[in-house]
Amino acid sequence: MMTHTGEKPFQCDLCGVFFPRKASLKRHMVTHTGEKPFQCDLCDAAFSGMTALKHHVMAHTGEKPFKCDLCNAAYSGKTALKYHMMTHTGEKPFKCDLCGAVFPQRGSLKQHMMTHTGEQPFKCHLCNAAFSRKDKVKRHMMTHTGEKSFHCDLCDATFLEKSHLKQHMVTHTGEKPFKCNMCDAAFSQKCNFKCHMMTHTGEKPFQCNLCDAAFSRKSHLKLHMMTHTGEKPFQCDLCDAAFLGKTALRYHVMAHSGENPFKCELCDAPFRAKSDLKGHMMTHTGEKPFKCDLCDAAFSRISVLKYHVMTHTGEQPFKCDLCEAAFRAKGSLKQHMVTHTGEKPFQCDLCDATFSLKIYLKQHVVTHTGEKPFKCDLCNAAFLGNSALKYHVMSHTGEKPFKCDLCNEAFRSKGSLKRHMLTHTGEKPFKCDLCDAAFSRISVLKYHVMTHSGEKPFKCDLCDEAFRSKGGLKQHMMTHKGEKPFKCNLCDAAFSGKSALKYHVMTHTGEKPFKCDLCDEAFRTRGILKRHLMTHTRKKPFKCDL
């Protein structure tokens, strides 16, 4: 009758909880005393109640007497079957009064309430970690003991949790039961399938309280929060590097060991990560599953698609704290920061040269070996890098994809367009510390500084001539060889340098682009204009020593 009346006459003297039966109170008292009188004959496990022991013994025998009528699922306990049935009916009778979330079990609701209260009653006695659930502290203790009680029968892998072992077994069977109905993707785990679906819906339920960032996974939010705190708990034992996540550290350690466990079956290319190998395979198949909604572009990786979309939106989320520069990629910001610090941590083993980026060092080392692996199919030219080859091929095709919005000029590279835009704005951000000169390009500034220092690092092996630029030396070498590859289309004249040809063509066209602001005179070169201006100022800088 007490189940109808709700009467609970038996009270615990230690915590005040009421029970309808004396036996229930007796079982409850064991939670205070810690007593576990019921011991398993097959292992060292002990329990406070006979029912719990019975369920445990079934884990040894594999017995699951409680079967679901709607599917093949079977359970060792009646309660477990009851909760399973709710997955079929969708029943969730326990509702949270604070947020409306519903749960199939009272225990699940109780655990959920702790997310509101922040309560973490289960504490680790070896460190300061605290948890909202008893099973979580139990799992945490294994990180101290190193215990991994769940073993794979097919390999040597061991796991802290049974669910992790279950997930691992799929790697042996290759089973991927969770299929996406919007694309061909399939997954071995429901959680990965769920996260994948968010790439279609755009849903990002986990939001950062400190900024506007949102994520599809709770683990991604957790990692993001460390970018605010600056915390990097995973440290490399071989160098000073530290990382937000364990996976990033493992990936980094391979850079020290040189380990590349994932190899391509079609070529011998090795990779550190499985995802890198997967992306590489698409270079063989030509597959590009990630398509842009704003243009016809398609990509083999979703990260490259995201980067591409920013070219449409103009979004540059990575901002420099020291200047107004902003970038689409975190790597680009990292490269930019070196311009402020001047740091060049990558040193060449063959000479004293140092570089701000590893890729620059890699390109430099090839100058010692003379290796140029990227060859042009249309001529004999060879290059250190793929991007240089691509740029060169455009000289054959005449392709100039980057167009100026203010004039009809077109360029082969985005950098060339960017530099050209400065001719319209008149902006010269690179200033000389030794005089008032300013330049639109840092390379021109470096070249200019040599006029003060007198430095000419590029020396000719055949004579005593020295030059400020590599291009100047290259052009000079043609005077020794008698080589004149730049030919005029309007006459038989030929030149060793491209700029000389350019000035010569002006003798045919009559073009004089450099105009004097003080009179109507115009000139073919900037140098001639500069000398002409001295006739106005009466300046005579060249004095006779005799």
Image (cartoon, rainbow, N blue to C red):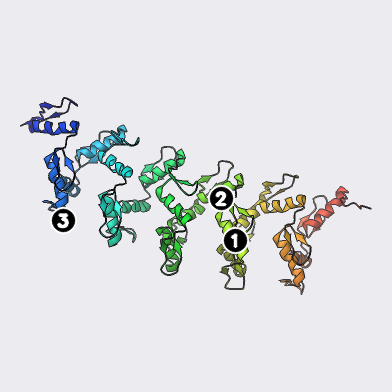
Residue lying at 37% horizontally and 45% vertically, measured from the top left: 219
Where is mark 2, residue-wise? Answer: 335
Q: Amino acid at mark 1?
A: Val
- Label 3 and label 2: CA atoms lie apart by 57 Å
- Label 3 and label 1: CA atoms lie apart by 63 Å
Direction from residue 133 to residue 51 in the image, left or right: left
Q: Measured from the top left, where is residue 506 in percent x and y?
A: 76, 65
Where is mark 1, residue-wise? Answer: 365
Please state, as top left, top right, bottom left or bottom right, where the N terminus lies in the image: top left
**Earlier-in-chain disc, 3 versus 2:** 3
Q: Measured from the top left, where is residue 392 in percent x and y?
A: 61, 66
Q: Measured from the top left, where is residue 131 in percent x and y?
A: 30, 37
**Earlier-in-chain disc, 1 versus 2:** 2
**Earlier-in-chain disc, 3 versus 1:** 3
Please, what secondary structure does the residue beneath circle 2 have?
A: helix
User: Is mark 3 in CB contact (under 8 Å) with mark 1?
Assistant: no
Please, what secondary structure does the residue beneath circle 3 have?
A: loop
Q: Amino acid at mark 3?
A: Asn
Q: Measured from the top left, where is residue 299 in percent x and y?
A: 45, 60
**Residue nearest the observer in this picture, 71 or 249:** 249
